[in-house]
Image (spheres, helix red, strand yellow):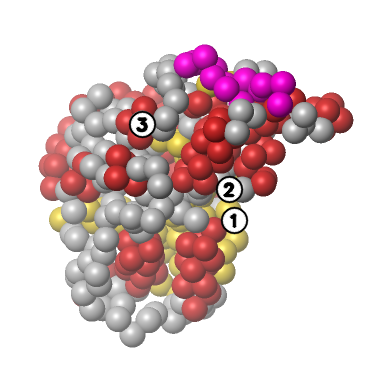
Amino acid sequence: MEKIKAKILNEIATSNKTFWELLDKSNCSLKDFITTLRTLYKKGIITTDGNYFYLTDKGKNNINLKSLNFKVDICSNCYGKRIIPRMKFKEILEGFKRIIEKRPRPNLDFFQGYMLEQDVISRVALMHYYGDLDGKSIILIGDDDLLSIALSLTELPSRITVLDIDKRIGEFIKSINKDYGFNIEFIEYDVSNPLPQDLYENFDTFSSEPLETYSGLRAFLIRGVSCLKENGVGYFGLTLYEASLKKWLAIQKLLSKMNCVITDIIQGFSTYPMDYGNLNYEEFAYNLGFKVGKNLGVNWYKSALYRFEILGKAKLPLEFNKKLRVKFIDLNEDITHPKLYKKILKEE
């Protein structure tokens, strides 16, 4: 908590910040951020006018003024992603935006949300950079982001297969196949169930944005790795907001046991809007004990991108082809789910 406290105070000392701006800079679990912010507010170290947080006189005494002389920014060209999509990727981004205009809205039953369009293209660009795109067979487990369509626009993969529980996504993909001559395979699939037998060890590349419960992460990754050939490659997103470092460690251990080597973890690679019109995941912020102004456009919810490679052949757990129990919500770490935030944030 001390690191989070120092981060919040240093951010406010530089200039007054909204709740959303502080959240954007926090890089920690959402629960820890809120707990720390509440503590600072209750102790009179910070205060708010309903829109901005600022230091009190007491708070100024908690700041090391020397540290304010040092400033570090994320690269303004790549935004910390390490890659910059160029040439044909710019054309693909514009085409992708047009195609997905009538995409299905997120469904709370599946805890859905989708990343910014430019971040979908950045993932495609990173896959291409590593040679995981051209001529490769790619399987996506879950495709809220419609990565399959962006991949198809490149005309580079040899095969694209989507597994998703939401049949609306399948219907949308099938309509796009018809309109644009794509050949995306869609299989309606619940990740808790065993994979269709013909998918095992049949793909070069796997990608997913899994549920962030441990059971969800475990199921998505086991299914994804099960689909990969020898020396196959996987990509998946994981936040710090709703997945603690303890959960990160558990997932890293799972990958290691399956003979997977993590090659990259790129913080903040994918950004998710949290208000989709029909569904708002930011309601938790209006029940914290102090006034929080409406978010006027800060896209704070970011996911780190993991890339891993199988070292030879995967070592799958014994239950890889059995039914797995999957929870959609982690009562200990989730806050943003609208059905639970009031219960989760109830003060002790």
Specify the farthest residue to the bottom: 318
Residue placed under numbered mark 1 in the picture = 264
Q: Are marks 1 and 2 in contact (CB under 8 Å)?
A: yes
Q: Amino acid at mark 2?
A: Ile
Question: Does 37 lie within the magenta span?
Answer: no
Pick whichever of labels 1 and 3 is earlier in the sequence: 1
Identify whether 236 is placed above or below 78. Answer: below
Residue at point 29%, 30% (across, down) = 280
Q: Amino acid at mark 1?
A: Asp
Residue placed under numbered mark 3 in the picture = 287
Pick whichever of labels 2 and 3 is earlier in the sequence: 2
Identify whether 138 is placed above or below 179. Answer: below
Question: Does 52 lie within the magenta span?
Answer: yes
Secondary-structure class at tag 2: strand
Residue at point 20%, 40% (across, down) = 107
Which class describes the residues within 10 Å of circle 1: few (<14), some (14-19), or many (20+)?
few
Circle nearer the viewer, 1 or 3: 3
Specify the farthest residue to the right: 66
Whether residue 12 sits left or right of residue 288 in the image: it is right
Give the magenta range.
Answer: 46-58
Residue at point 49%, 78% (across, down) = 257
Residue placed under numbered mark 2 in the picture = 266
The x, y position of residue 292, in whole percent, is 43, 22
Residue at point 66%, 22% (across, down) = 55
